[in-house]
Amino acid sequence: MAELKENRANFIEITAHDLPLHCPMPGMVKWNAHPRVFLPIQQQGGVSRCPYCGTEYKLTGPLPSGH
């Protein structure tokens, strides 16, 4: 089983595989996390910031068709 990671990063690059984007992301420790919030990264030019923890997400690579 994969080890869960603390949500300590200030900047995370994501790909189309991670859409729809939400913070905290799967695989992050939940006990100290904030409520899940979906981030409209595609409508914000490929960059979005979580309003709870301030983590900035950047979309890299092509989008799949239909997104």
Image: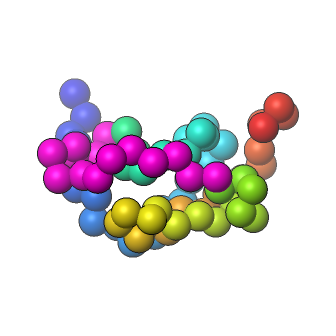
Residue numbers of the magenta segment: 27-40
Picture residue at 64% right of the left edge, 52% below the top:
40
Residue 34 picture location, percent across and down: 29, 53
54 vs 4: above or below: below
| Quadrant housing the C terminus | top right
Residue 47 picture location, percent across and down: 64, 66
Q: In this rendering, would 55 be left or right of 61?
A: left
Q: Quadrant of residue 20?
A: top right
Q: Quadrant of residue 3?
A: top left
Whether residue 44 appears in this view of the structure is yes
10 vs 34: above or below: below
Q: Residue furthest right?
A: 65
Q: Residue furthest top?
A: 1
Q: Residue furthest left?
A: 31
| Quadrant housing the N terminus | top left
Residue 6 picture location, percent across and down: 22, 55
Picture residue at 53% right of the left edge, 62% below the top:
57
Q: What secondary structure characterizes most of the magenta part?
A: loop
18 vs 56: above or below: above
32 falls in the magenta region:
yes
Picture residue at 22% right of the left edge, 43% below the top:
30
| Applied colour scheme | rainbow
Whether residue 60 appears in this view of the structure is no
Residue 44 picture location, percent across and down: 71, 63
